[in-house]
Amino acid sequence: MTLHRRLLLFGAVIPAGLIALALFLIGLVLDHLLLESVDRGLTLQAASESVSLFDRPGQDAHLHFGDSALVADLQRLHHQGALYGPDGARLLAYPADTAAPERLTAADVARAPALQTRVLPGGERLRELSLAIDSPRGEPHALWLAVSLASNDAALAAYARAAALIGAAVTLLMLLLQIAHARGLVHRVQQLHVHMQRLQDGDFSTLPPADPGTDVVASLRDAIADATEKLRTASELQHRLVADAAHELRTPLTAMRMEIDVTLRRERSPEQLIDALTRVRTEVDRLGELASKLLAMASLRRSEWERVPLDAVASVREAIASHRVVAERRAISLHLHAPEAAPIRANPGPLRQAVDNLLANAIKFAPVGSAVDLTVRDGETALELLVEDRGPGVPLEHRETIFAPFRRLQRGVDGAGLGLAIVREVAEAHGGRAWVSERPGGGACFHLVIARA
């Protein structure tokens, strides 16, 4: 079933059916209430007649219909009555053309009022009450009272006509409103469906059409628009990453091919071959480093980031120990400023990799004979690592771009250009962020913030 039909079914057809059912049940209740009113009137009339049937001199039986001051009203309401003697013969009747039975004995009726509805040959309904009554001389008599239900039937017919008219009008109005609402809603959802199909085809160039509404569909549209923006950004980054990776791979491969071609062009001495192979190996190492960094970055993006309790200070100390030999070659001293321990829940492998990348980057750009400071700040909501060097620093206009893959400020500097990109990936995966600022006194200060889980 389409969405449009479903909306019409549950928004118009079923409610219309429920309205019709409700009007029908109201009619049944109205019929019951009207009948109860008639029964109360008959019962009161029976009580009045039963105590005054034999109140005339000589105890002659008589009915009070004709004597009532409301005789005109009784005639208009079609009240009828009859009294039957001990032998069942009809003694009295009102009016003359009454529909009362010709014979009725006291044995045929109960001492308590008995009510029933009888349908006359012409279709008119008659509400009857029968009651057994003894005369003052102890003779059994039967009292029969009745009233036409024509007024009840007329009221019910009028109600049925009004209910049908009102129900039809409400149903038509509800159907028209629901058709308009369904068309608008289906159109809005259809636009999102078309947009999602474009996303499935890899087209992130456009956003879903603007939605002026304020309901859940509009919120869904905004969420899809945000997701589209993120997919577009991710796609652009992926394409740029692939292009940059291809360029970075082409450079060492070109150098290796040229070196091999030159070597094969003429005979070489063993020393020249060793020198050529050494240069080729350097390019192979560069390719290996690039491949390792690319694999690390891909692994970070696929990781589920299972956090475990660890000591961040201990991880930083291990990183310092592993880089101390490289730092000593350039007479660079490494200083740690941290508490005894900084417990946090984090993914140990990626966190250590981020610290290694920051430390290696600082050692690379720090002047010979200078120092690199590492500071751990243990906060309530996050843990922050600062890595400061005395190098040239990072110009303000490049402080964001250096965290993009394959972005290097200086040409000819060793490295794949992925270290800082990995640092940012690790920070964001842990709910934090990474950025660079200027170190007081000159140099760069890199910040790595890990949010507490």
Image (spheres, rainbow, N blue to C red):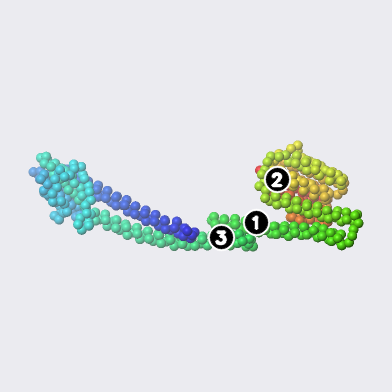
Where on the picture, by quarter, is residue 344?
top right
Mark 2, secondary structure of its residue: strand
Residue at the (70%, 52%) spot, across then down? 298
The residue labelled by disc 1 is 230
Q: Is residue 69 left or right of residue 302?
A: left
Q: Are marks 3 and 1 in contact (CB under 8 Å)?
A: no
The residue labelled by disc 3 is 193
Q: Amino acid at mark 2?
A: Ile
How many neighbours does mark 1 have within 10 angstroms: few (below 14), some (14-19), or many (20 or more)? few
Q: Nearer the viewer, mark 3 or mark 1?
A: 3
The answer to which of marks 3 and 1 sits earlier in the sequence is 3
Quarter of the image containing the C terminus?
top right
Find residue 239 and report its horizontal and vertical position in percent. Answer: 70, 59
The answer to which of marks 2 and 1 sits earlier in the sequence is 1
How many neighbours does mark 2 have within 10 angstroms: few (below 14), some (14-19), or many (20 or more)? many
Residue at the (78%, 54%) spot, across then down? 287
Q: Amino acid at mark 3?
A: His
Find residue 100 and report its horizontal and vertical position in percent. Answer: 16, 52
Mark 1, secondary structure of its residue: helix
What label does residue 450 carry, if any?
A: 2
Q: Amino acid at mark 1?
A: Lys
